[in-house]
Amino acid sequence: MVQARHEADVSRDLARVAELAREGRAAEVRTLATALDASGNLVLLDDQVLLGTLLGMAHANAQEFTAAKAALDAVLPLVPAAAPGRQARFHSIVAWVVHGFGDEEAAMDAVVRALALAESRPLEACGEDIRAALGNCSLVLSLLHLCPLAADVAARAVAVAADHGLPTGPSEFQVGFVYYTWALRLDHLGLAEQSGRPWAQAEAHFSTALASDTLSVLFRSWAAAWRAVCAVRLGRLEQGWADLALARRLPVDPPNSSVQRSVGLAEGALLLAEGRIREAEAVLQPLWTKFDRVGTSPLIEEVAALLGQAAAARGDGSTALRWFRELHERYGRAQYDAWMSRATAARLRIERKALLRRTRQLEWDALSDPLTAVPNRRAFDATLPRLVAAAHADGASLSLGIVDVDRFKRVNDTFGHPVGDEVLRRVADILRSHSRDAGSCARYGGDELTLCLPISGAEAVVALDRISRLIADHPWSAVAPGLMVTVSVGVAELGPGDTAATLLWAADQSLLAAKRARPPAPPWPPDLDGQVPPARPPAHGR
């Protein structure tokens, strides 16, 4: 029951953080994330990466891109060791943020990385992360003018959500946004004869999203405002006014500048469609001026297009021409053809990246321990000689620690092997989180793990003593009632004449001495009020 409550509490809190992040409520996300971190529950690296990703997402949704970048940079060192789904989700938010800074090449690189991660692993264990990553990437791709590719990626996000029993409302919203931006671009290129289907698709997906009770208030506001513009293009002005009223009623807190732009754009389009030219210009002109052409392309270009249409309707040809020049400086048929070529190239990049990741994954599987996800004995045997040779060549320090879980057989005998497996996972995670690189920690065999440190023996003793205390102080009762875990540690420093074999022998002798010196074992089994806790598979993989 303790374990079940612990897992439920953490899952509930993480879901709440994700909900706040979608609303762009960054201050509340930071407060809750800090409280979670202080609670001691979040010991796994994947949770730390998720919290940093969600904080970055919250700032991005609030159009606070500098703060979003800082939040992502804070967890960037942890990302390579995180689960592939977590990595994909992180890089998809990076893509959104760097695009907010106007760096399209960096945004495309991040999208390729995220999609390759999403394609390179089975999705059973990371459906929500993959769904979120695909959806975020589809939004960025649409802003990079790669609309056909964006539509494919967004549709896959909906399919992943449905396959995993996840809410599809957010993904339907993202598909709607892709078709909405696609339709706008076609209209701006003078290809209105081709935009009818994207407008209808956008309206249909926004409608599906709005019918969902899982869509956040912020996204509902965007969806209502953008569906109002769809209604104008499809000749449904009454529906458009109703959508605009809905967008204005929704309590977006804190106020969001992107929502304000979208609401203003919808109102201007509706007024212009009704022939209320001066009223439309009164809404659109300040909208363009106030935001100084800062906004999500092509939504901001639509303001220029509408102002040009309004001026033309008044017979003011010179003003109309100025606005149309403003628009067509950014667009052109040749550009559109170039965008389609870029989309094809982007597909090839993603496929190559995914293939490379699959190859590396096979290599990783051969050299990693499937239980703890750290390198295995084979990897350790290959790595240690290289580290020893490099240390001798550079005159650098190198120490080897061996960590042994005390009386591990008794843990398995009393609490069951699933609990024992979770103990090994958590001990490995603590060791890995204190390593300078992912390959320095390995599972040597059974309940023994190794840690290679580029420091002196005295420094290694201090570091491993600190790690031992962290392991002993870990909330093991959350895994199983009455569970306590300690470790014994052996440390050896590389000497001038040492080889990998002699260094390992010295560390092993140090471990044997430490095990002999540990206090006698308490009576076994321990007194648990007459109850031996049932063995249950602990939840893991977050």
Image (tube, rainbow, N blue to C red):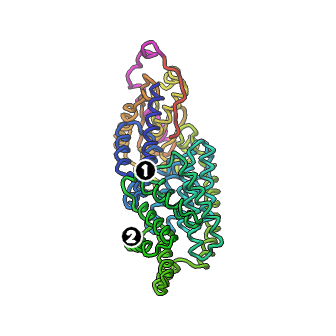
Badge 1 amino acid: Ala
Q: Which residue is mark 1?
A: 21
In x, y percent, where is residue 463?
Answer: 36, 41
Badge 2 amino acid: Phe
Quarter holding residue 10? top left
408 or 27: which is nearer to us?
A: 27
438 or 136: which is nearer to us?
A: 136
- Residue shown at 60% from the left, 77% from the top: 190
**Magenta residues, as a range?**
502-531
Name, please, the residue furthest toward the bottom: 318
Compared to 299, does 239 lie above or below? above
Q: Secondary structure at mark 2?
A: loop
Q: Which mark is residue 395?
A: none
Quarter holding residue 245? bottom left
In x, y percent, where is residue 393?
Answer: 46, 56
Q: Which residue is mark 2?
A: 291
For the question of whether residue 165 can be seen, the reply is yes
Q: Are marks 1 and 2 in contact (CB under 8 Å)?
A: no
- Residue shown at 53% from the left, 56% from the top: 136
315 or 470: which is nearer to us?
A: 315
Q: Is residue 450 left or right of residue 175?
A: left
- Residue shown at 63% from the left, 44% from the top: 163
Q: CA distance from mark 1 to mark 2?
A: 24 Å
Q: Secondary structure at mark 1?
A: helix
Magenta stretch encompasses residue 246:
no
